[in-house]
Amino acid sequence: MCLAIPAKITELDGDDMAVVALEGIKKRISTALVEDLAVGDYVLVHVGYALHKVSPDEAARTLQLMAEAGVLQDELDEMTGADQ
Amino acid sequence: MKYVSEFRDKDLAKSVSAAIRREADPGRTYNFMEFCGGHTHAIFRYGVQDLMPDNVAYMHGPGCPVCVLPVRRLDDAVEIAERHNAILCTYGDMMRVPGTKQRSLIRAKADGADIRMVYSTLDALKISRDNPDREVVFFAIGFETTTPPTAVAIKQAQKEDLSNFSVFCNHVLTPPAIAHILQSPDVQDLGTVEIDGFLGPSHVSSVIGSKPYEPAAEIFGKPVVIAGFEPLDVMQSTLMLIRQINEGRFEVENEYTRGVTREGNLKAQALVEEVFDTRDAFEWRGLGTVAKSALKIREAFAAFDAEQRFEISPKQSREVKSCECPAILRGVKKPTDCKLFGKVCTPDTPMGSCMVSSEGACAAYWTYGRFRTKSARPQREAAA
Amino acid sequence: MNIQDPKLSARTGSIDMAHGGGGRATAELITDLFQHHLNNPILNQGNDAALLPPAAGRLVMSTDGHVISPIFFPGGDIGSLAVHGTLNDVAMAGAKPLYLTAGFILEEGFPLADLEQIVISMARAAEAAGVPIVTGDTKVVEKGKGDGVFITTTGLGVVPDGVHVSAARAKPGQAILLSGSLGDHGVAILSRRENLEFETEIRSDSAALHTLVADMISAAPGIAVLRDPTRGGLAATLNEIARTAKVGIHLEENAIPVKPDVRAACELLGLDPLYVANEGKLVCFCEPGDADAVLSAIQAHPLGRDAALIGTVIEDDAHLVEMETEIGGVRVVDWLAGEQLPRIC
């Protein structure tokens, strides 16, 4: 359910509307559902509405966890002398 | 694309795949239900199953709003457009879903009904402004993610006094559906469905938070991980579920921390609360009648409620009899167990909604179906 | 030059039933608008049929009806599209296109200024391609019975000796080349559709591919298959070839060029670039030994700078197109059911 995509806010206007950029694509969306937005924030866009802000720190942390899973594997390989 | 491409990285996928193979106990199986059709789509679209060991399997849940909408409601929408001569605005997803006697919105449009595909409720409002002499009805479907935009539209219509705008509300709720599946005889008594844990929907949860899943995890002793929709999110969440099971835990964990908090989006929740009330019961395709599982428009906004504005006649809605969508939506059967699947029922000639929606298990199985490929076939034939 | 006849008044007038009646209004429309802009010796013969000189070699012929909304879009219009589309169908037989014809169905009320812009655009496209429009026809339908303008073009071309391009010649082991990025045309059109509007620099890739084909054939005359992945996108084209030649196809998703903006628009609307239409791209199947030479020839042409090797032909009794995905899984790339609709879930 719920196709949504993160996009960057490039303009905010007063009436709960904003322009977001996704690569070179620009789309006007509603920001009526999210508070405290600033130009440069990434928001998740669903059916023309921003649903939530994307947290850069948390995104980096999640990617770090994924990468660590592999680091363990490499270390394990080293320990057991396995060739990959 | 920032926050997208990183979560589709091949090397990172290998890394998570290796961790899953290392940590999954070969002495047992892990059956996870991805509640949400978005996960089903991601799993098939990216071939996630190919990166899993054989003892880790996904079963597909009812979290596809198109799939769970009973045929009756679709027939009602067609009636609103045809009999009441309204402009019916719909998301593209609904266009091809077969109603009674295979009558879809696209067919009704071909027969002359004014049915318009919109991307957003904002577009439906614009159509209302541009056509003041016509009734304009927004056919609202979707879970908690798609509900707040409908609430905003209703509030906006009230503010602008758009008296020709109304909403045919079919919004449904996730936690009651999860509880319903866990309470079903298939899971509780018959043991026909073994669910070891749930992948929870990230976008729904960005609105409602992770808290509403806590009772289900605790009462039924099943771990839940809120999972993002990119393939790496699905894989990492699978790893988190395996870890919980291996450690004997059944908690609500959150993989999609970049968008979900325990409390969710309070502003969106407040808007939904203001505009909508819970229905006592609602019929789900596949699950039957589920108590407190859907929303209706509150009395204060009754002027914008299509169900109150238009007389909708009682009708005998019918689905194709041998269609197994209902059992598939409960996780009891796989699409390949249905005798229509891939024969009379394909995306070109869908018999049920699960073959139409890109999130439907049948459509995902068939369209992306690795089981059909040359590399997978010998294996399957040997197993048969 | 402007249209001088005040009776036609292209600036302000519009098509009415008289323009299709066969009387003076029809004649004026033909002389002052069509012939004026499409001007060439064969068209100017002024007969119902164009008399053509003998052609050297096997002839190919293709016809294509063009209906598009919106009529004017970033990177082209229905006129240039009607020229390019048919030239490309002829070129995909490995042929050099020689002549075009054009049939117009006009709806009552269609602005003459728009029609003139479309005809000028056709004239430019035909001239740039070096292929004249040698005969044509115009009919007018009542208001409400058409969608402004429909254009059917037919192309005639000649295939050089020794060239045998056909989907049936796809064989396991052959390399699959794509001449550039996918989805530009479809996304440019969608960006202007009502209720979907978004801003983008993406323009339709609408272009005539016959000079590119000529360069490829001189690099490797043995090219087996050429196709332009228009409606239904690359997925439909490859499935057609697989079915015709009774082979399977294996693709590498990471090798398929898609512009970041096209990818972004597809993500936004829930579309798959593999199913989005192209109007200036081709796929080529050739022997693996020829792949480097053909790829270099494509990349040396202005329309093929982003060309890539995207997959191989395999044996498969089920004639499926399969693809190794971005993350290393495998999926089927099936035919599209109906039109690809923007979705929210």
Image (cartoon, coloured by chain):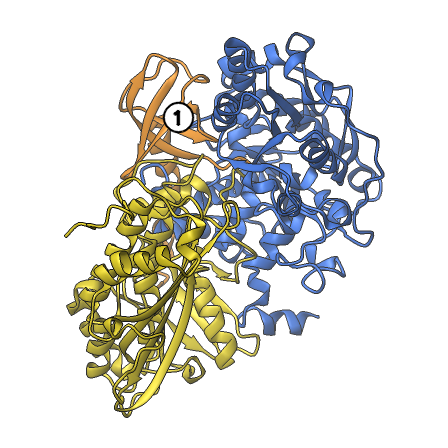
Chain colours: A orange, B blue, C yellow
Q: Amino acid at mark 1?
A: Ile
- In front of the other: C307 or B247: C307
Q: Tell me what residue is drawn at x 36 percent, y 48 percent.
A: C71
Residue B366 higher or lower than B261, as above or below: below
C178 displayed left or right of C39: right
Residue A65 percent coordinates (x, y): 39, 37
Q: Tell me what residue is drawn at x 51 percent, y 14 percent.
A: B156
Residue B216 higher or lower than B285, as above or below: above
The chain identifier of the residue carrying mark 1 reads A
Q: Tell me what residue is drawn at x 51 percent, y 19 percent.
A: B264
Image quarter where the N terminus of chain B lies is top left
Residue B256 higher or lower than B234, as above or below: above
Residue C39 percent coordinates (x, y): 21, 66
**Of helix, strand and loop, which one carries label 1?**
strand
- In front of the other: B51 or A23: A23
Query: Mark 1 highlights which residue?
Result: A29
- In front of the other: C92 or B178: C92
C224 displayed left or right of B45: left
Residue A20 percent coordinates (x, y): 32, 29
